[in-house]
Each structure stands twice: as C-alpha cells, then as structure tokens.
Image (cartoon, rainbow, N blue to C red):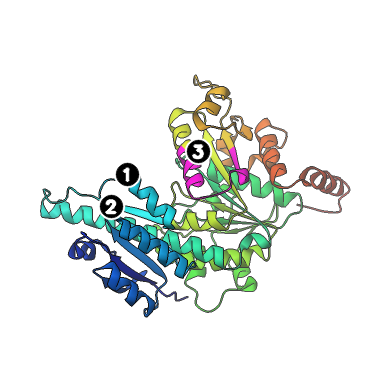
Amino acid sequence: MNYRPIRTFVAVGPGVDVKRISALMPHAPEVDVVALVPSLAESWQTLQATQSDLLLVCTQDSEESVSFVRAAVAERPGRPVVALFEGSPNWFVGRLFEAGADDLVTIPTDLAGDSAVVRSAREQAVAHEVLFALQKAMARRQTAGGANATDHARMITVLGPKGGVGKTLTTASLAVSLAASGRRVVIVDLDLQFGDVGLSLGLAPGKTIDQLASSGGSLDADKAEDYLVTHEPSGAKVLLAPTRPDHASLVVVEFLRELYEVLTSSFEYVIIDTPPGFTPEVITSIDVSTDVCMIGMLDSLSLKNTKLGLETLDLMGYDPANVRLVLNRADSRVGITRDDVHAIVGRPPDVLVPSHRDIPRSVNQGVPLVLSDPKSEAARSFRQLAAVYDPEFESRSKGRGRRRLFGREKI
C-alpha cells in the first residue's frame, strides 16, 4: 500500500535563521516540504497558491506569528498547524495554542558551543521531534475529519507508559473474557517490535500485521480476516505483531486508520495492545478509540509514569470519562496504600487485580487465567473489567455457561 507523504508548508517568522530551520527539518519519506518561505508576509501570499496538508510556523516571541497562525486556522480550519519555537518555553507558547496551533516543538538555543558531532546529533533529535509532531497532528486531524471507527464498535486501547505492568496480560484476559461471552472480539498487537500477544494466548505463528500492511491493493474485511489468527478456546481473533523488530516500520499511521475502520465494521470489540510510550501509532489508536484502559502497578515508578500518562491523555484532549485505570498486583505489600495511589495518580483505580502465583505459569503456558483458573480473584477482576465495557457481560456469560452445561455449545 502506497501512502502520500505529508505536504508541509514551512513559514519562517522574524528573527529565525532560515538555514538553521532547513537543518532541523526531517529528511524522511513521510514528509514533503512543498515550500519554505523566509517571511510571514510572503508566506501568506504563497500559502494561498500552494497545495499543502500541514502548516509549520517557525517563530520566536512574535505577535506577528500569533496573528499568522490565527489567520491560517480561520482560513482553512481542517489543515493542522505545528509551531517550531526558538527559545525557552514561556507564556508565549500558550498564545500559539490559543491561536489554534495543534502542537509545538522547541528549538534549543545553546547549540553554538557544541562540537560539530554533538550539534549534528542534537539537530537530528529535534528533526525527529518535528517528524513526530507532524505525524501526530495529521493523525488527529484526519481521524477527526474522516469516518470515525467508534461509529461501529467499541475500540479499547490498552496503555501503560512503563513496561512490565501487565498490558498484554490485561489485553488477553479482557479479550478472552468478552469473546467467551459471545462477543465478536479482535486484538491488534501494536507492540510492533516485541509483541507477545500470540505467546500469551498460545497461538501458533501465522500472518502478521506488517505482512498485511505491505500486501498491496485495497483493504477490506475479507482481506483483513485472512490475516487474523483465531484463539480457539474463546473465539477471539488476533492480528499478530511482526516476527522481526525491523519490520515495524512497514506499519504506518495511515494504514492503521484504514485498518481500524475495517475492523470496527466487522467486530463488536477491537482491543489494541500497545508498547510503552506515546508513539505516532499509539496516538493514532487513542484518537479513534472509544475507550482507553491505563495499566499501572503498585510501585512508585509505575505510578509516576501512570500519572504522566493520564496527564498526556488530558493534554491530548481525550475525555477522562472514557479512561479506565487498572492496577495490577494491587495486593502487593510495598508500603503504598490505595489512598496513596489516589493521591499520586489523582484518581482511584477502577479495577484492582491481585497477585496470583499461577499468572506467570498461565502466561508461559499460553492459557489466560480467566480460562485456567476462572474462580481465582485475579480472574474475577479481569471479568469485572470486561463488565465495565459490556453492561450485558454477566448475563451473557451465565447464559453461555448454561448452554455449555447441556452440551449445546463449546467455547
């Protein structure tokens, strides 16, 4: 599948070095700089005659830049605006956001004293930040302007800013619980370098998400189905992560938007297992999700990162009412109480999952605890989480349990 790069118009404000801006622009196939104009007055005239997907405004503390951003947003509301700000973040940054900027990247002001090697490395780091900001802005605007995946199904993105908190465990347990109750469920393993959903469910190797992304041609429900692996005990479907970390780059945000629209038209629940951090792929998933499930653990480092993750969702404008907080190993005796959790994170957990000695064994065997030991407290907690997302979960589970008892249905 071929995707057009982001056509980026670069407008340079007063006092900003154009050569320096050129050095900081990302040299990547995802970005096509259609114009780089060294003054805002000239930029306004050229902007009207140039086809562009995104406007990048490079500025210092300048009221002219604020006015330029405000006018550009009013003239074409659907085109995202990213600011490249030279200087230390201050009150002026807020003015840019008030004017309508979608995102902002700051340029360090202390590069002059660095060696050529260090300066080059720091410039590359800024260029990477710029690329990330452009992709994020495009993902959010295009999602808002296009068909919304949430029109068809419930899409749940499982987040955990810190690794090792049990995202995959929670994803697998939630999906299996919902699928076993009769819901049509699909998991997308978005941990593109080190995804383990397949192992956690005991699935044999099969087709993967990167193979689907690079398959060519149009994407529809039948084609997507050909790349899904079935978890036979529950009926849940899984789109597996790449088998090699270097294949992760084949999965781009535009493909994901198309994929999510297809999956949410075919399934009742689409559950996304994510890597740590807010990558462009994760942000794209969040933006089209009906729900976010944030995972934390009962230790200070995890809780700190959980708090930062919740704050990031808030800055992204995600509705807090659609965020659920799950605390794994919630009965660990580490000197942190549930009241401490509320004080650190800023909200109480919605679901508490206690430790269980068989959880590591269930993961190693590829059989989720909700199937291997359904009466355990941990399994009950995961079913409680399923009930959060499906008000009919308990009644559906009891009904299917009775049918299985009389041999009418197998799961």
Instruction: Answer with mark 1 or mark 2, whichever residue precedes in sequence.
Output: 2
Residue 30, horizontal then vertical, whole percent: 37, 69
What is the span of residues highlighted in magenta in the rendered image? 308-325
| Residue bearing mark 2 | 61
Q: In the picture shown, does residue 53 fall above or below 97? A: below
Picture residue at 65% right of the left edge, 33% below the top = 378
Identify residue type, mark 1.
Asn
- Residue 403 image label: none
Mark 3 and 1 residues: CB-CB less than 8 Å, in contact?
Answer: no
Q: Secondary structure at mark 3?
A: loop
21, 154: nearer the viewer: 21
Residue 137 picture location, percent across and down: 44, 60
Are dots 2 and 3 in contact, CB under 8 Å?
no
Tell me the SS state at disc 2: loop
Would you name the residue on which mark 1 appears?
90
Rate crowding at label 2 as few (under 14), some (14 to 19) or many (20 or more) other CA atoms within 10 Å.
many
Magenta stretch holds residue 313:
yes
Residues at badges 1 and 2 in contact (C-beta under 8 Å)? yes
Q: Main secondary structure of the magenta part?
A: helix
Residue at 45% x, 28% y is 300
Spatial CA span between label 2 and label 3: 42 Å
Observer-nearest of 296 and 116: 116
On the image, the x and y values in percent for residue 85 come to: 29, 54
Q: Is residue 72 shown in magenta?
A: no
The quarter of the displayed image where residue 383 is located: top right
Name the residue type under label 3.
Val
Question: In the depicted view, which residue is nearer to us: 386 or 133?
Answer: 133
Element marked by disc 1: loop
Residue assigned mark 3: 165
